[in-house]
Image: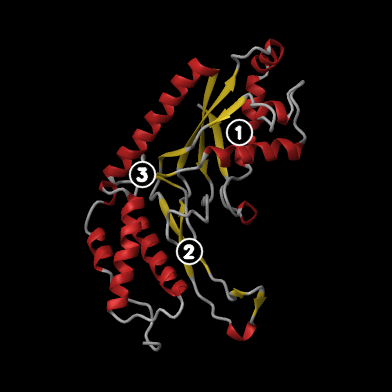
Amino acid sequence: MSGKRVNFKCEYFERLRGEDLTSYNILSAILIAYMECFMECLKQGCCLQDISDYVSMFSRQATLLLYNKLSCDNKGLVKQMEQAQRYAEKIVETCTTVFGSCYLLKGTLKSRLIVHMRNPYLPLDVGLAWDPYLNLPYIPASSVKGVVRSYFEEKGITINQLDTSILFGSRDREGYVIFFDAYPVACEKTLIEPEVLTPHYSEVEGMIDETSSKPRAIVYPTVARGVQIIFPLALKIVDEREDLVDIIKKNSNTIVNNISRALEQGIGAKTALGYGYMEVRNM
């Protein structure tokens, strides 16, 4: 058993390859595949001295499945992204009534994007945030807010009396800029692109043993270049603080333009390595 490699064909994956993946709940399909393939691997006598060997094998197959089945000419995928577009537009319609002012920003990815690398719902070496209802990868509102706030703080941006604690909130008060989850609404060739990482060392009990170096390629999913992502956001101009609301109204374009520039600086994981860069425009 120890001489065999973790390399096998999983019947569940073979079945998925023959069907339209968009007709499945992708999160559920991958979770089911993880268990089905694991049991099949055990029956075939695969080497499982280290469960990470199986995870890496599974991650490779799952990523390639997403890459091959979620091409941009897939009618099911196009329908899902159109639904995401309508959902974002509905958010704008509703939050305009609630908050007084709402915007849609659209970003076109200039590099691959990865968000929530440690997503607990995807049993992969490197995960990706995936919305179980719209059945699409997405950028959580918390990630959008974190990127924008960090940019404002780093650049020292203050718009009249509006500093980051007023715009984005603090422990004591709610902010005047409201963010929502962001979704892909169009793509060029494929929605998902595989990326490869090859770590050489595994850390065990805080130490790295060079004599046990085992370079192992890890294949994981990223959102592809050219994908268009829509960002709904609101400016809260319905408030008892009329002085602040008046400043926000007068400077709304400046606020939104700075948010666009913040998003263009990169969002998600590994931005220092060139991931998550985009061109953003106000719709």
- Identify the residue position indicated by label 2 in the image: 125
Residue 194 placement: quadrant: bottom left
Task: Report how far apart the C-alphas of labels 1 and 2 lie in the structure.
Answer: 32 Å
What amino acid is found at the position of numbered circle 1 in the picture?
A: Ser
Q: Residue at x 57, y 39 (%)?
A: 142
Q: How many marks?
A: 3
Q: Secondary structure at mark 2?
A: loop
**Most distant residue in the front direction:** 172
Instruction: Locate residue 12, reporting x and y percent.
Output: 25, 64
Residue 77 numbered tag: none
Please tell me which of labels 1 and 2 falls first in the chain: 2
Can the viewer see residue 70? no
Q: Which mark is residue 260?
A: 1
The answer to the question of whether label 2 and label 3 lie on touching residues, with beta carbons closer than 8 A, is no
Which is nearer the eye, 32 or 66? Answer: 32
Q: Which mark is residue 135?
A: 3
Which amino acid, by three-letter code, is at mark 3? Answer: Asn
Callout 1 secondary element: helix
Q: Residues within 10 Å of mark 3 (few under 14, many from 20)?
A: some
Which sits in the foreground, 128 or 264? 128
| Residue shown at the point (37%, 61%) measured from the top left | 62
Picture quadrant of residue 265 = top right
Relative to 150, is 45 on the left or the right?
Answer: left
At 34% from the left edge and 34% from the top edge, which residue is drawn? 83
Mark 1 or mark 3, earlier in chain: 3
User: Which label sits in the foreground, 1 or 3?
Assistant: 3
Gap in angstroms between the C-alphas marked 1 and 3: 26 Å
**Do residues under tags 1 and 3 come within 8 Å of each other at their CB atoms?**
no
Label 1 CA crowd tier, 10 Å (few <14, some 14–19, many 20+): many
